[in-house]
Image: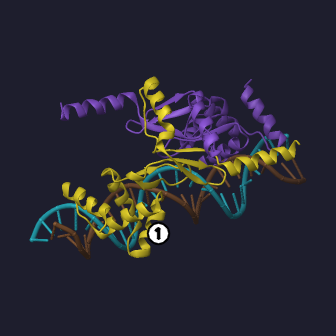
Chain colours: A purple, B yellow, C cyan, D brown
Amino acid sequence: MNGVDTELRQTLHRRGLRMTPQRQLVLDAVAELGHATPEAVCTRVQETAPAVNITTVYRTLDLLEQLGVVKHTHLGHGAPTYATSEHEHVHLVCHHCGRVDEIDVAALDDLTAALRESHGFRLDATHVALSGSCRDCADRADAELAEDAP
Amino acid sequence: MNGVDTELRQTLHRRGLRMTPQRQLVLDAVAELGHATPEAVCTRVQETAPAVNITTVYRTLDLLEQLGVVKHTHLGHGAPTYATSEHEHVHLVCHHCGRVDEIDVAALDDLTAALRESHGFRLDATHVALSGSCRDCADRADAELAEDAP
DNA sequence: ATCGATGCAAAGTTTTTGCAATGCT
DNA sequence: AGCATTGCAAAAACTTTGCATCGAT
């Protein structure tokens, strides 16, 4: 029924690990939520299975990441967020309003190539968010500046 | 004697705030350490003044940041790191070995311009680290792959 | 003398760990 | 049945808050 779950079951079996309801639910939650904190994943999972402990969510997220099924991203402030590996993108986080936009990884291709050439550094563009001001907050800041010194 | 401290004293006075030994020490520690966690700053400060509490370090770092004297950066994993505003650079963090390199902000100028044009997003390149593999870890990973499939 | 700054202790958040009980295969 | 997985509780890591005391101006 769910291709992602079937794939996960097989991946687990290959390593002698087991498929459990909790793991299904966590993976489903991550896939649905797009990019979610462990806390958010837990809340979502508990809507279906209230008994699932947040400890299990943390452990499952770690496991799924080791298996390459999900990846976490640091948005800058508090908790990391998890998303399925297919859903990879670069995050633009506004540190004024907290808004998160997503852009294509290709936007960093030039930078990736340059860093590799100049420093031997292999950039993982999806692992960190880029921080700054979104259009709205930047415009608002500009407007306020204009008031002070017209 | 120390220009940074004198400047700080004046900045504080403008807002009716006070210059204290603790604030001097915290600022000095941040300047010396380059990019340091609150914990590391505290340790450094306590080498000179053992009585200084980590609470004060947190409070002082927040204050110094509000004043624009220091800025914090999220390196990806645990605690944020603080550096003086003059010392701004982009961090390259290896998530295999934890190594942190610094590169010039200019390396992201093209990206900054592109994001601003395409999304109205004003990138603050110094606020987040770029994550990936450093040259050594990448080479090591390549070598191991070559062993498995020669 | 005033009022901001500090230290201490305690609590809040987020994440990890140990261990007995559970349940997948 | 065997052993991975889970839940619970406790600890660890990181940060914030309340309050009485201290000290810069």
Q: A40 or B123: nearer the eye?
A: B123
Number of numbered labels in the structure image: 1
Quadrant of the image for the N terminus of chain B?
Answer: bottom left
Q: What element carries label 1?
A: helix
Q: Quadrant of residue A44?
A: top right
Q: Residue B16 appears at what percent x and percent y?
A: 19, 57
User: Mark 1 — residue?
Assistant: B43
Point out residue B26 in the picture as x, y percentages from the top left corner.
Answer: 37, 64
- The front one of A40 and B95 is B95
Residue positioned 75% across, 50% down in the render: B140
Q: Give B134 or C10, whichever is nearer the viewer.
A: B134
User: Could you tell me residue B121's position as x and y percent?
Assistant: 43, 30
The vertical placement of A130 against B43, above or below, is: above
Whether residue B50 is visible, yes or no, is: no
Chain letter behind tag 1: B
Q: Residue at 48% across / 59% down in the picture? A: B36
Give the residue displayed 46% in from the left and 62% down from the top: B33
